[in-house]
Image: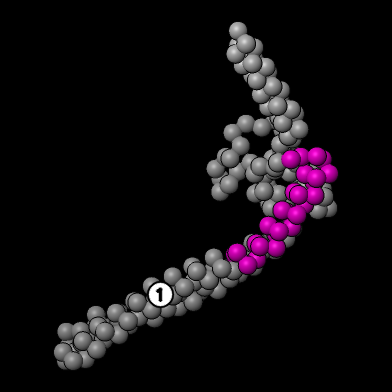
Amino acid sequence: MRQKSLLAVLAFSLVGVCGYSQATMKIGYADVDYILSQMPESKEVESQLQTTNTQLQNQLQAKVQEYQQKLQAYNAGAATMLDAVRKEKETELAQLEQRIQKFQQDAQGSLQKKTAELMEPLYTKVGNNIEAVAKEEGYTHILNGQVGGIDVVLYADEKFDISDAVLKKMGITPTGN
């Protein structure tokens, strides 16, 4: 009998502690992608990245065009070439092909690095403002609504979405989600 009483007291204490800790937590969420899409700086970053991408594409096209011209010249004269000349031309074409592949890889890495470099200040700004809004409104935790297009928060009441409050904190008028 005494053990049952002790277990009952422990159970009620545990429920009380859990209830107390839940009562002191306030969890909200923010959609970082939405916030970024509303920032004028994002449009500037997108424009810079598009310019860089266009420059890289133009350089790639020039390399491919050079390769195609040399390949066409090789195909036109391959039947009449001496073996040594043919092998030299084939080696040159193979090297051009390798340089094109290397350029594509380097260009992709360069674009990723530039993206990270340009986006870092925006992520920092958003993060600082999320923290400021969370502190002002008494949130203990803020979750991101999505990460890379995948929902992290499976359900959330919209009244706990602080995305528009973060935009207002940054001086941006939200245009809708």
Q: Name the residue rendered at 63%, 67% in the picture.
A: 117
**Which residue is at the front of the view, 63 or 111?**
111
Q: How many residues crowd around disc 1 within 10 Å: few (fewer than 14), some, or many (20 or more)?
A: few
Q: Which residues are magenta?
A: 115-140
Give the percent coordinates (x, y) of residue 114: 59, 69
- Image-based side of 110 in relation to 168, left or right: left
Q: Residue furthest top?
A: 1
- Image-based side of 76 in relation to 69, left or right: left
Quadrant showing the C terminus: top right
Give the percent coordinates (x, y) of residue 57: 50, 71
Give the percent coordinates (x, y) of residue 159: 75, 32
The question of residue 116 being in magenta is answered with: yes
**Which residue is at the front of the view, 76 or 71?**
71
The question of residue 19 being in magenta is answered with: no
Determine if residue 65 is in view. Answer: no
- Image-based side of 14 in relation to 129, left or right: left
Determine if residue 136 is in view. Answer: yes
Residue that mark 1 sits on: 102
**Which residue is at the front of the view, 34 or 162?**
162
Q: Amino acid at mark 1?
A: Lys
Q: Name the residue rendered at 62%, 11% in the picture.
A: 2
- Image-based side of 164 in relation to 154, left or right: right
Q: Which quarter of the picture shows residue 49?
A: bottom right
